[in-house]
Amino acid sequence: MLGRVSRSRSRFLRENVDWNSRLLGIVGARGTGKTTLLLQHLAEAEQDQRLLYVSADHIRLQASGLYEIASHFFRLGGETIMIDEIHKYANWSQEVKNLYDSFPTAKIFFSGSSTLALQKGKADLSRRAVFYNLPGLSFREYLSFAHGLEFQAVSLPELLQNHTIVASKLLKAGPILGRFNDYLDHGVYPFFLEGIDDYLPRLLNVLEKVLYEDIPAAIAIKTANVPVLKRMLWLVATSQPFTPNIERMSRNLKISKEYVYNYLDSLERAELLSGFFSSETGYRLVRKPSKIYMENTNLLRGVAGQLGGKDQAGTARETFFAHQLKSAGANVRIPSRGDFLVEGKYLFEIGGRTKGKSQVKDADNGFVVRDEIEVGFGNVIPLWLFGFLY
């Protein structure tokens, strides 16, 4: 496994993780590179016999038990154990807690692909573990993995203040818009490196596994009801964008409103959908998102393609913007005017190359984000540039 793992490039999170923590978890959607992240760290100390890597779905671990294997390793002098795909082990949070308490000098690192399945465990270990979320690739990371182009991430305030200078420097590496379109199509998950022709089938396979394995294992939903989840995804993927009407969804899907809320929440926690709330306040507004997007543009195009259609350009632009800002850790809301309110003060209107400024003209921090332009001016910023936030 170490012989096959890439050591030349790694995800941005690798530099941000405190590997000195006694208990840390790398969580996120399937296919974002969590296993590779653990193996790359292990490869740095390949000859160190005090580190052990195990996969939670391995038959020997399932038969012997996580606690038994790890405790035996620690008693032999082992210092760090890495447990991959930990959500596939039934009693993982209790046994990890017991290991943490029983071996006060040991380190325990683990990864989990199913955010849904990890929710209870995160609560159980909240005072002990440090959790890191690994989102899909940013556009900046895609350029590194696909084209060997290395750029530093840019903070949002710096981008907004100096976007013309930043874009001009980045463009010295060559044309950007074609590569940006490639990213929107197949650049979010690192497995595009194994073949672009196989990317869509693999992406749809990930989608099926989440729908038929991860979600039913985490919530009380029968496999026969999974098509309801699929219909929800189709609704979002074919809307411009999707504004949820819970009562209408309840009637059309023939399920109660409570189930509509629960299923939408499950799809979001499974990182297939992203819901964004209004910038207003109140119980109703807090419970029901104002807009719902597919988690990223690759999923958007994959699901829309399954239906024999194409995604709407406007929806794809907003999906990209929302995905990059959310993954960078920004607070994103839906304002009464404009498309997005970020960090409670930056108002954004998203559109094509001729998008006007009317929606943000009176805002103190209003910006127009245009697709299909390389360099902006004033408060007009190219869409692709927001792919450099992480």
Image (tube, helix red, strand yellow):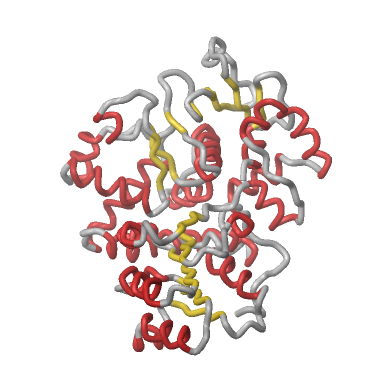
Query: For this rendering, which residue is in front, 102 or 229?
Result: 102
In the figure, is residue 161 to the left or right of 229? Answer: right
**Quadrant (top left, top right, bottom left, bottom right) of the N terminus:** bottom right
- Residue 15 is situated, as x and y percent measured from the top left of the image, at 64, 57
Return the residue found at the far top: 362
Q: Quadrant of residue 198?
A: bottom right
Along the line of sight, which residue is nearer the eye, 27 or 242?
27
Q: x, y percentage for residue 204?
A: 46, 59
Q: Residue at x 17, y 46 (%)?
A: 255
Where is 221 relative to 105, above or below? above
Residue 196 drawn at (x, y percent): 62, 60
- Residue at left offset 48%, top offset 50%: 299
Name the residue rendered at 66%, 43% in the picture: 180
Q: In the drawing, does residue 213 fall left or right of residue 356?
A: left
| Residue 95 appears left or right of 161 | left
Measured as percent of width and height from the top left, residue 236 is found at 38, 41
User: Quick check: 348 above or below 192?
Assistant: above
User: Which quarter of the figure has residue 383?
Assistant: top right
